[in-house]
Amino acid sequence: MFKKIYIAAFVLVLSAGMAGIKSNPVQASGEVAHPPSQEWTTDGLFGFFDRKQIKRGWQVYSEICASCHSVRLLYYRHLGEIGFSSDEVKKIAAEAEVAAGPNEDGETHNDGELIVRPGKPFDKIVSPYPNDLAARAANAGALPPDLSLITKARKNGANYLHALLTGYKDAPGDFKLSEDMNYNPYFPGSQIAMGAPLSEDGVEYAPEIADGKKATVDQMAKDITAFLIWAAEPELEERKRIGVKVMLFLIIFTAMLYAVKRQVWAKLH
């Protein structure tokens, strides 16, 4: 009797599995290319931020990516953590226009235009669009994602982002590419609304942060990725320092306990 029940259960599970495979052909055909692994200074137990690289990444973001993508969790004052001086932070913030409150007469608009003021360090980094509807309207219905946590929000985030930015190519002959879409094997479905954002010499690195690097597509992709790794986890260095201290403490504490244990058992023997 139990044997019949086991056989029936096995057949039922097998049937359900086969049904799942047949009913989900998109999953089988929508495989995404695995992003190649890159070397990041933040990898490993003693990982750290390369401040010059993050500054280059900020330059790539501000000159290229900021026209479509926001970093809503960052404030201008946070840029001081990557090596910008207070005067530099003030200058960067002042280049942005931030929505201001009512003027002295209580008016919020002037001739139909929103009252704005130069940004200050305590302001959030200005987003390119006032809301998601405006963002979709400007991008044919596609919503450019916020990049604040993008390296955490995607599996293998840093390598994925670098591969995505450098992975644009012509679609294979047997691939049906939708209208106004671009082929990228690292994006789910292999087609993406965003065109290739990076091009050779797309920015001119400031001499003090260039560090001998040329603004190639690969280098810019690495630099913007490094910036976004920092944006998603600015406390990474402190966390790793604390981790090393905790591990050293545990090693010493374990050695002490072992020594005490040997002494206690030596007396008993």
Image: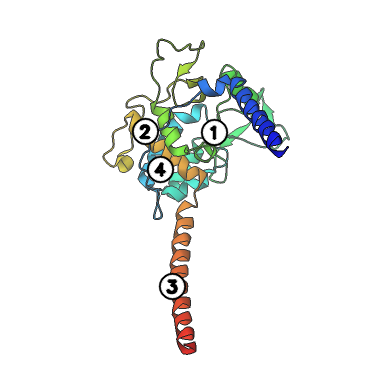
Q: Which mark is residue 70?
A: 1
Residue at 47% x, 21% y: name it: 190
**Residue 71 horizontal side relative to residue 130, left or right:** left
Q: Amino acid at mark 4?
A: Ile
Q: Which quadrant of the rendered structure holds the N terminus?
A: top right
Q: Earlier in the sequence, mark 1 or mark 3?
A: 1
Dividing the picture into quadrants, the one containing residue 172 is: top left
Query: Which residue corresponds to mark 2?
Result: 220
Vertical position of residue 205 compared to residue 258: above or below: above
- Horizontal and vertical percent for residue 58? 43, 38
Q: Earlier in the sequence, mark 4 or mark 3?
A: 4
- Horizontal and vertical percent for residue 68? 52, 27
Query: Which residue corresponds to mark 3?
Result: 252
Q: Closer to the camera, 155 or 140?
A: 155
**Residue 50 horizontal side relative to residue 245, left or right:** left
Q: Which mark is residue 112?
A: none
Mark 1 touches mark 4? (CB < 8 Å): no
Q: Nearer the viewer, mark 1 or mark 3?
A: 3
Dividing the picture into quadrants, the one containing residue 115 is: top right
Mark 2 touches mark 1? (CB < 8 Å): no
**Separation of disc 2 and disc 1 at Cα?**
18 Å
Residue at 43% x, 10% y: name it: 174
Q: Residues within 10 Å of mark 4 (few under 14, many from 20)?
A: many
